[in-house]
Image (cartoon, rainbow, N blue to C red):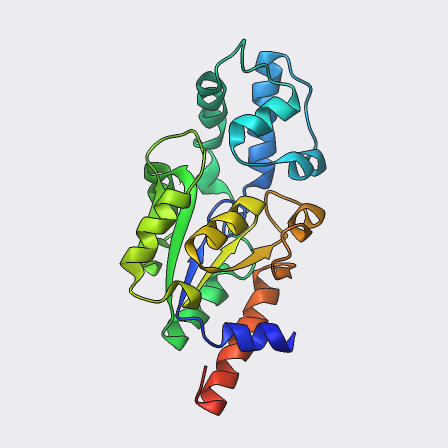
C-alpha cells in the first residue's frame, strides 16, 4: 500500500478508459451480445461468463463464444450488437466514484483524459448526455466500430499531453488496457468492476483495485504525501 501511495504522488495526468471503467455498461453489453447470439444461433452467456471470456481483439472474443466468423462476417455481428448497445448506452449509470475522482483531480490540478475503443462519435455523444464532456482535456475514441486496439491512439494522445509518460496514470478494466499502458510507458492500474473479472486482471501483475473509490483513496493519500514532503 505504501508503494502505491508513493507511486501515485508523482502523477500529473490521468487517462481513463471509458467502457466498464467510468460507465457501468456490463449488463447492457451482455444483453447486446445475447441478442446477437439469439439472432445468429449462439447460446446466451451470463455476466460472469462474459467477464471471464471478454478479450481484445473483440472478434476473437466472439469466436470464443461460438460465433462462426467464417459464416457471418464480424462487421455484420458488430452492426447487430451496436443496434442494441449504442441506442441504450447513455442510460447506463456511471461507476461509483467517478464524480468524486474528477473533483479530486481538479482540486489537485491534475489533468484527466479519456482513451476508449468505442467509436469516437458515440463516446462524445454519451459524455455530453452525462454532462461530462467538458471535464476532460482530451477525449479519444476509434474512427471505426471494430474495437481492435487503441495502442496507436494512445501514442498520439501521449504526444499531446505535455507530461512525461511515466507521470501519466492509465486507469482501465481489461488486460488490453494494461498492454496499452505498457506500450506507451504509462503507469497502469486496473479496476475489477468492468469487462474482465478479478481473476483475469490479476494475470497482469498491475495494481488492482476493487473500484474507483478504492483507487481514489490511495491516489489522494499519495498527493497528500507529496504536499507534505514537497517532493515526488
Q: Is residue 150 visible?
A: yes
Question: How many numbered marks does the figure carry?
Answer: 0
Q: Quadrant of residue 110?
A: bottom left
In this rendering, position of residue 132 left or right of residue 210: left
Q: Is residue 128 visible?
A: no
Q: Quadrant of residue 206?
A: bottom right
Q: Where in the figure is residue 131, as x and y percent of width and height?
A: 36, 53
Instruction: Say if 23 sits above or below 74 in the image.
Output: below
Front position in the image: 96 or 203: 203
Q: Residue furthest top?
A: 71
In this rendering, position of residue 118 left or right of residue 201: left
In this rendering, position of residue 163 left or right of residue 174: left
Front position in the image: 218 or 80: 218
Looking at the image, which residue is at 45% across and 51% down? Answer: 183
Quadrant including the C terminus: bottom left
In this rendering, position of residue 190 left or right of residue 199: left
Looking at the image, which residue is at 57% across and 14% down? Answer: 39
Q: Quadrant of residue 6?
A: bottom right
Front position in the image: 20 or 178: 178
Q: Where in the figure is residue 114, as x and y percent of width and height?
A: 39, 52
Q: Where in the figure is residue 29, as x and y percent of width and height?
A: 56, 34
Instruction: Say if 6 sits above or below 145 in the image.
Output: below
Q: Where in the figure is residue 226, as x and y percent of width and height?
A: 47, 84
Q: Residue furthest bottom?
A: 229
Quadrant including the N terminus: bottom right
Looking at the image, which residue is at 61% across and 19% down? Answer: 37
Amino acid at each position: 500500500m505504501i508503494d502505491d501511495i508513493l507511486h501515485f504522488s508523482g502523477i500529473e495526468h490521468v487517462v481513463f478508459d471509458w467502457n466498464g471503467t467510468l460507465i457501468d455498461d456490463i449488463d447492457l453489453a451482455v444483453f447486446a451480445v445475447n441478442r446477437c447470439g439469439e439472432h445468429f444461433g449462439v447460446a446466451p452467456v451470463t455476466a460472469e461468463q462474459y467477464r471471464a471470456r471478454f478479450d481484445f481483439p473483440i472478434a476473437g472474443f466472439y469466436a470464443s463464444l461460438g460465433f462462426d466468423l467464417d459464416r457471418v462476417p464480424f462487421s455484420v455481428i458488430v452492426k447487430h450488437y451496436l443496434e442494441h448497445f449504442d441506442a441504450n448506452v447513455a442510460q447506463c449509470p456511471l461507476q461509483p466514484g467517478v464524480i468524486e475522482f474528477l473533483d479530486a483531480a481538479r482540486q489537485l490540478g491534475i489533468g484527466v483524459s479519456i482513451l476508449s475503443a468505442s467509436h469516437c462519435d458515440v463516446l462524445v455523444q454519451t459524455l455530453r448526455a452525462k454532462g461530462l464532456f467538458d471535464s476532460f482535456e482530451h477525449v479519444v475514441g476509434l474512427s471505426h466500430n471494430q474495437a481492435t486496439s487503441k495502442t496507436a491512439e494512445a501514442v498520439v494522445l501521449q504526444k499531446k499531453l505535455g507530461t512525461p509518460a511515466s507521470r501519466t496514470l492509465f486507469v482501465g478494466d481489461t488486460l488490453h488496457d494494461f498492454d496499452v499502458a505498457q506500450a506507451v510507458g504509462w503507469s497502469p492500474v486496473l479496476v475489477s468492476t468492468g469487462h474482465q473479472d478479478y481473476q483475469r486482471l490479476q494475470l497482469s501483475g498491475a495494481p488492482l483495485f476493487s473500484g474507483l473509490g478504492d483507487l481514489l483513496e490511495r491516489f489522494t493519500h499519495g498527493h497528500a504525501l507529496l504536499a507534505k514532503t514537497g517532493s515526488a
